[in-house]
C-alpha cells in the first residue's frame, strides 16, 4: 500500500499533521508512507521512523505552473492507493485531482467534495483538551476505521549527537547547572503575532524575580534588533540571567537546545509546538486575532496553559469578524497587559518548577 499525506504551510501545521503518519504506521506497518510539505519545514520531520519519503513543495512549484505540473506528474507516477489531504487548499486540490489515487480523504468543503472519496466534517469546537488542531487531523483517519489505539501526540526526534552538541553549547556559555532553564518564545512569525516587546520584557522580569533561572531567547539573527529591545528593557538583575547569545545555527540545533530546557513561555508559533512535541511544559500568549480553540493543544491547566485577550476582556472582541480582529491586532495587543495574567504565569511556574 502506498499512502501520501499532504500538509503544506508552516512548521506547526506540518509537525501536528505528522501524527497522521505516525498512526498510519501503527495501522499499516508495511505501507509506504510519504509526506508532502514545504521545504522549510523538513527539519521537524528528521528522524521520524514513520515517514518513508518526504516530498518537497518548493517555491518554484508555487511560482511556475510548469514546475507545479511536473510535481503533480511525479506524484501521479507513484500510483498512491490513498491520499490524506490535511492542507485542503488550492495547491493540494490540484495535486489530488491529478493524482489518480484510488481513495482520497480530506475535510468537507463546499464545492470541493467531488475531489475526494471521503469528506470529513470540519469540526468547529474541540471535544477534548487536545485542541482543534489535533482533533481535526485525527478526524481524517476516521474513515479508515483503524484497529489501533490512536496516538494523538506530535513527536520530535533528537539524535545523541545533537543532544550532546546542545549540552556542549550550554557549557560553553556557562549556564548554571543547578538552575531551571526557561526558553522564551520571544517573537511571533509576524508583528501581528508578536506580544508587545515592552510587555514581554515585564513578563521576563517576573520570571526572573526571586528565581534562580537561566533564560534563553528564541529569535532568528535577522530579528536581533527586536530581541535587543526586549533585553534592554529588562531589569539589570534579569539581564544577568539571560544568555542572549546562546542560539542554534539552524532549526535542528534549536530543537536540541529546547530539548535541554525545562519549559517554554511566550508567543504562539513553531517554537511552542516543537517544545510540546519534546514534552516540555508551555505557557502560550495568543495574538488577539488567533483562535485559541485551535492551537491551545494539550491544555491541562498544569503543564500547558494559554492566555488570550478574550479570556479577560471579551467585550473588546465580541461581534468582530476575523478580518477586523486581524486589522486591529496591534491596538488590541495594547489592551492585553501582563498584569491581566500575572497570576496564571505564577501558577504555571510554581507547578513546573518542582
Image (cartoon, rainbow, N blue to C red):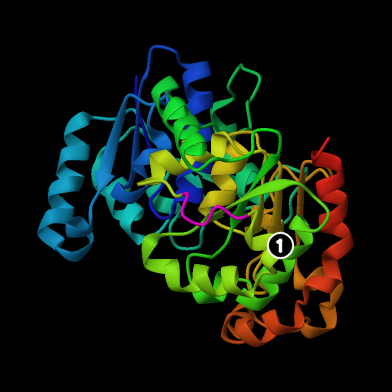
The number of numbered badges drawn on the structure is: 1
Bin the neighbour count of mark 1 within 10 Å (Cα to Cα): few under 14, some 14-19, many 20 and up.
few
In the picture shown, does residue 70 fall above or below 237?
Answer: above
* Image position, residue 215 (x, y; %): 63, 51
* Image position, residue 140 (x, y; %): 54, 39
Q: Residue at image x 58%, y 57%?
A: 185
Toward the viewer: 327 or 72? Answer: 327
* Image position, residue 345 (x, y; %): 81, 57
Whether residue 95 appears in magenta in the rendering, the answer is: no
Taking 328 as reference, is 54 left or right? Answer: left
**How would you classify the magenta stretch by its main secondary structure?**
loop
Toward the viewer: 97 or 160? Answer: 160
Taking 1 as reference, is 342 left or right? Answer: right
Q: Report which residue position mark 1 lands on.
A: 237
Q: Residue at image x 80%, y 58%?
A: 209
Residue 169 visible, this angle: yes
Residue 140 visible, this angle: no
In the picture shown, does residue 46 fall above or below 307?
Answer: above
Name the quadrant of the N terminus: top left
Name the quadrant of the C terminus: top right
Which of the 4 quarters of the picture holds residue 181?
top right
Magenta stretch: give its range. 242-246
Q: Describe the element under mark 1 as helix, strand or loop.
A: helix
* Image position, residue 172 (x, y; %): 46, 38
Whether residue 244 appears in magenta in the rendering, the answer is: yes
Toward the viewer: 299 or 216? Answer: 216
Amino acid at each position: 500500500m502506498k499512502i501520501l499525506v499532504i500538509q503544506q504551510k508552516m512548521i506547526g501545521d506540518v509537525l501536528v499533521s505528522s501524527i497522521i503518519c505516525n498512526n498510519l504506521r501503527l495501522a499499516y506497518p508495511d505501507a509506504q508512507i510519504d509526506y508532502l510539505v514545504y521545504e522549510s519545514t523538513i527539519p521537524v520531520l528528521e528522524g521520524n521512523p514513520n515517514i518513508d519519503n518526504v516530498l518537497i513543495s518548493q517555491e518554484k512549484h508555487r511560482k511556475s505552473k510548469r514546475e507545479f505540473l511536473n510535481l503533480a506528474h511525479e506524484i501521479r507516477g507513484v500510483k498512491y492507493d490513498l491520499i490524506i489531504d490535511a492542507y485542503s487548499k488550492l495547491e493540494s486540490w490540484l495535486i489530488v485531482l491529478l493524482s489518480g489515487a484510488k481513495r482520497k480523504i480530506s475535510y468537507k468543503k463546499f464545492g470541493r467534495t467531488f475531489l475526494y472519496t471521503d469528506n470529513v466534517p470540519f469540526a468547529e469546537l474541540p471535544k477534548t483538551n487536545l485542541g482543534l488542531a489535533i482533533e481535526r487531523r485525527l478526524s481524517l483517519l476516521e474513515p479508515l476505521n483503524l484497529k489501533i489505539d490512536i496516538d494523538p501526540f506530535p513527536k520530535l526526534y533528537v539524535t545523541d549527537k545533537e543532544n550532546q552538541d546542545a549540552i556542549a553549547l550550554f557549557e560553553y556559555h556557562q549556564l548554571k547547572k543547578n538552575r531551571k532553564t526557561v526558553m522564551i518564545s520571544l517573537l511571533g512569525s509576524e508583528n501581528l503575532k508578536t506580544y508587545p516587546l515592552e510587555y514581554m520584557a515585564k513578563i521576563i522580569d517576573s520570571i526572573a524575580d526571586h528565581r534562580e533561572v537561566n533564560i534563553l531567547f528564541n529569535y532568528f539573527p535577522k530579528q536581533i534588533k527586536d530581541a535587543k529591545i526586549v533585553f534592554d528593557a529588562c531589569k539589570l538583575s534579569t539581564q544577568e540571567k539571560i544568555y542572549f547569545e546562546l542560539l542554534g545555527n539552524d532549526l535542528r540545533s534549536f530543537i536540541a537546545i529546547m530539548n535541554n530546557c525545562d519549559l517554554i513561555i511566550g508567543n504562539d508559533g513553531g517554537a511552542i509546538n516543537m517544545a510540546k512535541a519534546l514534552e516540555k511544559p508551555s505557557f502560550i500568549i495568543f495574538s488577539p486575532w488567533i483562535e485559541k480553540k485551535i492551537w491551545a493543544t494539550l491544555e491541562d491547566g498544569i503543564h500547558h496553559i494559554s492566555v488570550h485577550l478574550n479570556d479577560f476582556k471579551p467585550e473588546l472582541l465580541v461581534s468582530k469578524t476575523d478580518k477586523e480582529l486581524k486589522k486591529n491586532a496591534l491596538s488590541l495587543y495594547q489592551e492585553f497587559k501582563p498584569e491581566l495574567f500575572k497570576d496564571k504565569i505564577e501558577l504555571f511556574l510554581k507547578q513546573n518548577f518542582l
